[in-house]
Image (cartoon, helix red, strand yellow):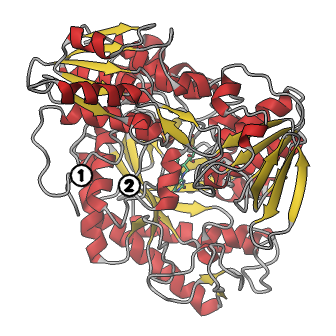
Amino acid sequence: MTQRDPRYDILFESVRIGPVTAKNRFFQVPHCNGMGVSFPKAMAAMRGTKAEGGWAVVCTEETDFHPSNDFSPLAEGRLWDHKDVAVMATMTDAVHRHGALAGVELAYTGHRDANLYSREVPLSVTGLPVAIDYPVQARAMDGSDIKQFRHWHVEAIGRALQAGFDLIYIYVRAGASLPGNFLSRSLNQRSDEYGGGFVNRARLFKEMLEDALETAEGRAAIAVRFTIDDEPDEADEFFSCFGEQPDLWDVNIAEWRKDSLPSRFGAEAWQEPLVARVKQLTTKPVVGVGRFTSPDTMVSQVNRGILDFIGAARPSIADPFLPRKVEQGRVEDIRECIGCNICVSSDFTMVPMRCTQNPTAGEEFRKGWHPERIAPAATDKTVLVVGAGPAGLECAHALGKRGYHVVLAEARDDVGGRVSIESRLPGLNEWARVRDYRQQQLHSLAGVELYTQSALGVEHISELAPDEVVIATGARWRHDGMGRHHSGVIPGTNAVHVATPDDILEGMIPRGPVVIFDDDCYYVAGAIAEKLASENHTVTLVTPASDVASWANNTLERRFVEERLHELGVTVIEKHDVGTLSADAVEIHHIHSGRRTEIELGTWVPVTMRDPVDDLFHALSAAQMNEPDGAPWRITRIGDCLSPSTIAAAVYAGHRFARELDAEPHPGVGFERE
Ligand SMILES: Cc1cc2nc3c(=O)[nH]c(=O)nc-3n(C[C@H](O)[C@H](O)[C@H](O)COP(=O)(O)O)c2cc1C
Ligand code: SF4
């Protein structure tokens, strides 16, 4: 086995955390996953896989611990009673099996949540409407509520110990946790001994910390997750009071979109100044995050005294075996997170986590998929994969790992398909890692032959005579505006100068004022607007949605997009649909009132829907029908060529084909249910 590079040795030093010891510096910080309380076996298997991949500490997601604060409809962790203890014990067992420590992030969000499942009245520092979109208000806690809350917290720590956790968190973040709400000068409007000056506002945290240390009695470490930018001017005072009390500090940024920063809006290690500040205020071990994928950055942060633990949420999702790969001297095999936040979208949409880079994420239990292991080929079939975009590349990669003979044919002179093309858009360069990882892996797979500049037709495929043909030829944007709001062509399309996103990405220069119609509502329209505005075009973006890039709320990108377009002077017109196009004007109307307006038009950019590029699939299918005995091969289309969707869906489709080839179908619905 290859040995690790000695310059990474420091990452594999053990670190003491109060009464427990972490075997190295790799620390999976709390992250939700859309499974939690709804699919606990899936959650436990996912955490166990990370422990197997070498993470020294593996934490839960935020975990509610009393019905007076329930996080539903989100699928987070739960530790209300003995039933949850049994569930959480399956996670701690899975983590301990691989010599890692298990941490639980106990959280009480106060007026963030509406208690939709328990139907209890929410409690918080101040009486306020709840933050989620639901017409209910939280009640301000009185002295007896606070006493009772402390009792619930102590009981929860008892349950966490029973479940086998080695680290127990107190979560301090204004707006998302009770001690954070009490500390916050804006949220805390109290006039009792818990309100007013710093000492009073910090009282609840002080009591919780003392309760936790006393209850744990050294059986588990007490960690505090602290968002230092909530009240930065009070940080020195806070740490002079509490800096040495917990066993560990886990530091991050308060606002989620800036904490799980999309790569489009910032690079690795952007949290360094905040984490460095905490490290100077305490001698206790400090965890910091920053979408760390480069072992050199990690080493540099440890050596420069910025942090003690490499905290990671997304890098651990994209590659659960990241630590193991560094340890084994296989740094080039790391599947680096691309910062797209599709993983975050699973939390909002409350479905098992998915990841663009790691198609096995969330499938560890229900499909038995392992990120590093895959069953060997069951036959000696030759598989022809046509199209080396995200679906085709992943399909060839996973089939190659199984040991199949694969011919991967790509019409263009480079691989990556839409990933290569879209990663040229502003801020999307890290998305090219989807291509780079797979392209790099293919080099080591002797059974995979890659041919670029190889547009194949039926006759070529007949000559090749493979056993299986996989068509992964992608999709192209429609030019006529058909999409969610228009089930047919937008009238007047033929009269205007049209540039689809594909045209623009292939180099077409728009003329005159550009009007982008975004009926797709994810990243493409906003990124095209950004590109064109940066190139000094006058750009108007019209969308029927209430917000620009509305779906990108789920990936924490939307507000950044809005800010960026505003800075660049793009005119954004929301809640408007398009009526008729004419050579130099677009008629739009408000989707509710119907009030009409005209905008000047030079180039019309419809971002509405894509059509599968499936001509080859249909031609092959027709040729197969004409064969007297049918062609000897099976034809399957995957990814955007079957149904245009996210890059994550394309990678998953490619992986799925490879996993399922010659395999016994899973009985029932195709996966294990809970
Ligand atoms: C999918 C996802 C879910 C998260 N859920 C939580 C959570 O439950 N509790 C929490 O404190 N932070 C949560 N976070 C924030 C992460 O812990 C972390 O601070 C942030 O993602 C930055 O680290 P990274 O760059 O390594 O992802 C979540 C992050 C992600 C990506
Ligand atoms: S979904 Fe995207 S951001 Fe999340 S872990 Fe995977 S690659 Fe990273």
Q: Position of residue 90 (x, y in %)?
A: 24, 58
Assess disc 2: are there few (<14), some (14-19) or many (≥20) residues with their C-alpha within 10 Å of its C-alpha. Answer: many
**Could you say which quadrant of the image residue 136 lies in?**
bottom right
Q: Tell me the element at label 2.
A: loop
The amino acid on which the numbered mark 1 sits, given as a three-letter code, is Arg
**Could you say which quadrant of the image residue 617 lies in?**
top left
Q: Please tell me the numbered disc located at residue 352.
A: 2
Foreground pick, 218 / 595: 595
Horizontally, residue 303 falls left or right of residue 533, namely: left
- Tell me the quadrant of the picture where the N terminus can be found: top left
**Could you say which quadrant of the image residue 123 lies in?**
bottom right
Whichever of callouts 2 and 1 sits on the residue coming sooner in the sequence is 2
Q: Position of residue 85 (x, y in %)?
A: 29, 69
The amino acid on which the numbered mark 2 sits, given as a three-letter code, is Pro
Q: Position of residue 113 (x, y in %)?
A: 57, 75
Horizontally, residue 502 falls left or right of residue 543, namely: left
Q: Tell me the element at label 1.
A: loop
Horizontally, residue 495 falls left or right of residue 368, namely: right
Q: Is residue 331 above or below residue 109?
A: above
Q: Is residue 546 above or below residue 113?
A: above
Q: Position of residue 423 (x, y in %)?
A: 61, 26
Assess whether mark 1 and mark 2 are in contact (beta carbons under 8 angstroms): yes
Tell me the residue that label 1 is attached to: 366
Tell me the residue at 41%/46% (across/down). Answer: 354
Foreground pick, 674 / 61: 674
